[in-house]
Image (cartoon, rainbow, N blue to C red):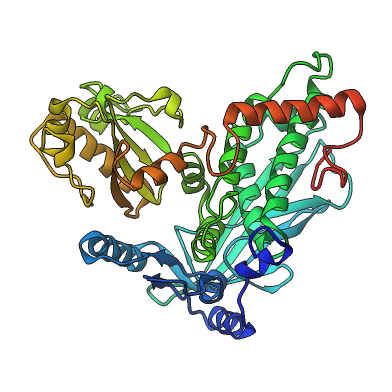
Amino acid sequence: MYDTDKERVLHAPRSTTWISIAEECAEEGVGVSMFLAPGRYMDVGSVGIVPTLSGGELFWHPRYVPERDYSLVRSQLARLVSRTQGFNCSLRVRCSHGLQVKTHYGAFFLSAPTELTFGNISSDSAFTVELEHTRNLSARAYAFLQCAALYTSVEGQRRVRVINLAMNVVELAGSVFQYADMETVVAHLAKAAMASMTQQRTLITREDLMEKCSALLLGYRKQCAAATRSTQLIIPEAFRALPAFTLALQKTKPLKARQVSSDVRNYHIHRILSMGARTLMFYLYPRLLALHDLDESIALPQLVENADGVKVERVIAPSCMRDSYFFMQASGVYLIDNEETVIFWVGSSVSPQLLQDLFGVDDINSLKPQMYNLPVLPTTLSTQVHNILSLRFAQRGRPVKILLARQNMDAAEIEFSDMLVEDQNNGAMSYIDYLAVIHRQITKVLNDGGSFSASGIRGSPW
């Protein structure tokens, strides 16, 4: 079924029974979370619809190994029961005159056209709403949004949470681009792409994403930079990383051109639908860090002054590098983190002292590929790396799997290379080539008119 019109069937339940179970759970205020540990195909597209519609979560542990996965499952279960959450939630988004809610994307049950029902809603989940105009808005007034959630707290109290937002209305396209939030746009594009997986081929979804990226940049070019030469690729400051994130989204497991098990695809579809913006951005563009280049003052407790002039102890996080082999060297050790997995990549020419300081051995062949936890050593480097991992755990609130990949030796290196989204991998082009294609599309439309494809630019705001 891959690469055919029947491909979308793989991402939908085989029986309506699963949908009925999910809807009943959501309406009764029950959020179903599943820990899946398959040794073979198990049709996640069917069973996974229950957590997706009821507001629960999927936890994925293929080929379960106790030594590797026990502590991770234990931590995930602890997070599941200890995080901020509510039950039996009915949620509605309202807007002022001139706007209306067009559609919602996320992991929930749409019990009415404008009402979302969650069996469980937590601090780890998020959804997006797409608005449309119903009439002209006055630039002298505000546009208002309200999100109201009726839910039951963990203590059993029935509560209402209301969030109000007043937005400025502008007449100039330049103001829209100047104050736009790229992370919100990328999160919305990602959730919309995942929601379309049951309706169309993966290839069409990838093409739609590229067209939307090109359409947004073309809109800026026409509205704000029409005087520049067509040979220049003009990208607005607020969206300077949009092509990189769009390409990264096309390389995710649900959308990559290479064949991926439908179980794996459906798990990641569920995760992307429920991810918050912060987690999703790091999932799409993993954080790559050169551990051998860490400054001695980085990732160690330091006294710094806060806004009140009081000195407090803080750990300063190191800056990351671009996700490409081009910026790496064989004598280094790198850490990459995509919010699902942390991989330590060890170069073939790494120094014995570096290995001793971080792993407690001085030979790359002595490293065990089954290393699932970083050893705690009385060295500066080991302390720095553990502080980095602790800081990231505190930020996301949930544990991740740790793997080791030695250059040209371990299977985990394949997963590591897939995370380098700026390289040519996952059946898709490199970032430089992707920019060239987008530039060529925009230039062709500017010079010849028409649209990016025979069917036009789907979803273009311009």
Q: Nearer the viewer, residue 115 or 186?
A: 186
* Residue at image coords 57%, 32%: 430
The answer to whether residue 220 shows anywhere in this view is: no
* Residue at image coords 17%, 28%: 354
Q: Is residue 431 above or below residue 153?
A: above
The answer to whether residue 121 shows anywhere in this view is: yes
- The image position of residue 286, as x and y in percent, is 44, 40
Q: Is residue 45 above or below residue 325?
A: below
413 displayed left or right of 419:
left
Quadrant location, the C terminus: top right
374 displayed left or right of 55:
left
Q: Is residue 105 above or below residue 336?
A: below
- The image position of residue 56, as x and y in percent, is 47, 70
Q: Nearer the viewer, residue 287 or 406?
A: 406
* Residue at image coords 27%, 24%: 331
Quadrant location, the N terminus: bottom right
- The image position of residue 264, as x and y in percent, is 49, 61
* Residue at image coords 29%, 48%: 403
- Residue 450 is drawn in which quadrant? top right
Farthest residue, direction front: 408
- The image position of residue 298, as x and y in percent, is 26, 25
